[in-house]
Image (cartoon, rainbow, N blue to C red):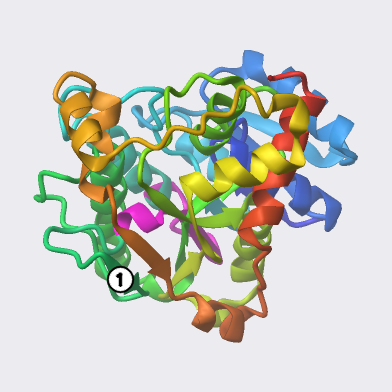
Amino acid sequence: MADLILVTGVSGFIAKHVAFQLLQKGYAVRGTIRALNKADQVKRTLSEAGADISNLEFAAADLSSDDGWDAAADGCINVLHIASPLPTSQPRHREALVPAARDGALRVLNASRNAERIIMTSSIAAMGYKADRPAEYTFGEDDWSDPEWRGLTPYAISKTRAEKAAWDAAIEGGYKHRLTVINPGFVFGPALDDDLGASIELVRRVMTGDMPGIPPISFATVDVRDVADLHIRAMEMPETGGRRLIAAGETLALSDMAEMLREEFPDYADKIPTRRLSITMMRIFALFNRDAASISGSLGLTSYADAKYVTELTGQKFRSGREALLDTARSLIKIKAL
């Protein structure tokens, strides 16, 4: 009988890829979703991607409620907690996303107390975002974002507070050695269906002309297939217990991404913006637009992720940012999302 793995938020972009790879490797998967009426869509997506869904089941559970988590985790050898609130637009209040992210993580950890391995998805947003950063800087496993810094987005605040709460709970509960946290960069890669993540939505907006120009911002990028692979490697390698594993490769400026897309997809070249927005222009725009305000603290700065130790520890290699970006665009064309 196949080992049963719990994947929280299985309808999400990263979680679907994790579930797909788990099924391909012969594991049984129980995915949590807030409403079971989304189960058919997830099954259809994974089946069309080539997965055998006979070992896929679902459980209803919501990060904002205690209900359903014990039942969801019951009988699962390992737990991969990937679910997290990710708004389509920036909320008004800085701490708005914290209760669902932090308390939801603690609910999952409590329900997973008997699991052999617990893998939690955090983000590089919980690392190295603080005041007075130099124009170029490198962050690593020991770095933490400052949730009190006014430039930190509600999403990054929620990720930072949720991850810190998870480590505190693991230390207090005596299972830090069974917990591994994955900290992905800006996640590109092929979309399996039209339920798009925020990073995929950015590529869609660039290619459809929804952006008036290109702000001076860069991202430490990673392919979703590598993120999913690293989750499973961490699950299968107890020696990753107690570690934060950065999942990120090269850093790309958004202007360079736009140029790559323009060259590779000439049919969309006329829609892809060429105008480069200045820092001053973006900061003025941020005065009345919360989405613009959310990136104001990173304008003109370039961050690099030090993930060499992850490759040395797990053997995980990361695709180039160009490959991840272009495969994102190809998938958007394939699913007719442009």
**Residue pictured at 41% horizontal, 28% vertical:** 67
Work out whether residue 10 or residue 317 is closer to the camera in this orientation and state it.
317
Left or right of 202 on screen, residue 146? left
User: On screen, 245 above or below 74?
Assistant: below
Mark 1: secondary structure: strand
Q: Quadrant of residue 130?
A: bottom left
Q: Which residues are magenta?
A: 110-126
In percent of width and height, residue 49 lies at 85, 37
Left or right of 254 on screen, residue 249? right
* Label 1 packing within 10 angstroms: few (<14), some (14-19), many (20+): few
Residue most extreme to the bottom: 312
Q: Is residue 112 magenta?
A: yes
In percent of width and height, residue 306 lies at 44, 76
**Residue pictured at 42% horizontal, 36% vertical:** 214
Q: Determine if residue 85 is in view.
A: yes
Left or right of 250 on screen, residue 328? right
Residue most extreme to the top: 37
User: On screen, 156 above or below 25?
Assistant: above
Q: Is residue 227 magenta?
A: no
Q: Which residue is mark 1?
A: 137
Figure quadrant of the N terminus: bottom right
In percent of width and height, residue 26 lies at 85, 55
Q: Determine if residue 166 is in view.
A: no
Work out whether residue 69 or residue 137 is closer to the camera in this orientation and state it.
137
In percent of width and height, residue 98 lies at 24, 37
User: On screen, 37 above or below 327?
Assistant: above
**Residue pictured at 46% horizontal, 24% vertical:** 211
Q: Quadrant of residue 269?
A: top right
> In the rendered structure, which amino acid carries the disc numbered 1?
Tyr
